[in-house]
Image: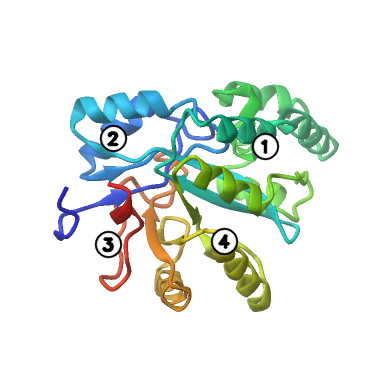
Amino acid sequence: MNTSTSSFCADLHCHSVISDGVFTPDELARRAKDSGVSLWSLTDHDELAGQQLAISTAREIGLAYLTGVEISVTWANQTVHIVGLGINPDDASLIEGLRRTRAGRADRAKRIGDKLAALGMPGAFEGALPFAGNPELISRTHFARFLVQAGYFSEVQAVFDRLLKDDGPAHEPMQWASLEAAVTWIRGAGGVAVIAHPGRYKYTATQFGALFDTFKDLGGCAIEVITGSHSVPQFKEYAQIARHYGFQASCGSDFHSPDESRVGLGSLPPLPADLKPVWLDLV
């Protein structure tokens, strides 16, 4: 595969209905292909169930594919997401680790429903369930979609801004996997660990330094630089961080749906030419 041409487009972060997207893995594969994506990865939250369909569809339509997953991690009392690329989706330790990470989501969702009811929005748990393709992975996004459908808000982002962000009145904290465990599972499954959208995390400069140092010490080797979750100034900021720490660079739209995502599949600019793309060692 020629990854050096200007027409090469990698999108290594998106979500299907298996987690909190709205399209099936095969629909996403075709959408990526039609959008000009050259190399694609499906990275559902804490779940590998969509991988085989993504693999077979990508093969059928001639789209280069990297297996992927996005693991929820608790680090310094905040949620951080670690993407694993090029993993073996049949790896037993990874499968078991993700199962443990998913455990407790349903109970957490019921507590979110209780908080929303106390805020005057009853029936949110029952209303959110139909939006979750996998009830084990019911998330804040599914609640937000229900609240928009029910007429409480006009858009999903407004629900997060008002109620479901980490310090919002309906947020319910969750203890996810450790950073060490997530990186170990990914590396043990033959993959590369990537810090997803670092610009989203609310850490101090000192905390960020500790996060990057710890991640690198554990064997993590890449961060997302160009992502739909970053602003344009953050593209430059995290490119510089990648240079400083010697990280490889990844990119991805973080696509969930046409109505909710900031950018579409394959619509981001290319990585800076001086950074090593994470996929060079994987394809």
Within 10 Å of the Cα at label 4, are there few (<14), some (14-19), or many (20+) other Cα atoms? few
Q: Is residue 73 above or below residue 148?
A: below
Within 10 Å of the Cα at label 3, are there few (<14), some (14-19), or many (20+) other Cα atoms? some
Return the residue nearer the eye: 78 or 124. 78
Of circles 2 and 1, which is in front? 1
Question: How far is the residue under mark 3 from the one under mark 1?
Answer: 33 Å
Dividing the picture into quadrants, the one containing residue 75 is bottom right
Please, what secondary structure does the residue beneath circle 2 have? helix
Question: How far is the residue under mark 2 from the one under mark 3?
Answer: 19 Å
What residue is shown at x 45% (from left), y 61% (from top)? 222
Amino acid type indicated by mark 3:
Pro
Residue 236 % position (x, y): 40, 74
Q: Is residue 280 above or below residue 241?
A: above
Horizontal side of residue 76 vs 150, given as left or right? right
Of circles 3 and 1, which is in front? 1
**Residue, disc 4:** 200
What residue is shown at x 34% (from left), y 33% (from top)? 28
Amino acid type indicated by mark 1:
Thr
Kindly tell me whether residue 112 is visible in this rendering: yes
Residue 85 % position (x, y): 42, 45
CB contact under 8 Å: marks 1 and 4: no
**Residue, disc 2:** 31
Residue 267 % position (x, y): 29, 52
What residue is shown at x 33% (from left), y 26% (from top)? 26
Point out the tag, 3 or 1, that comes first from the N-terminus.
1
Horizontal side of residue 38 vs 137, given as left or right? left
Please, what secondary structure does the residue beneath circle 3 have? loop
The tally of labels here is: 4
**Residue, disc 1:** 101
Please, what secondary structure does the residue beneath circle 4 have? helix
**Residue, disc 3:** 270
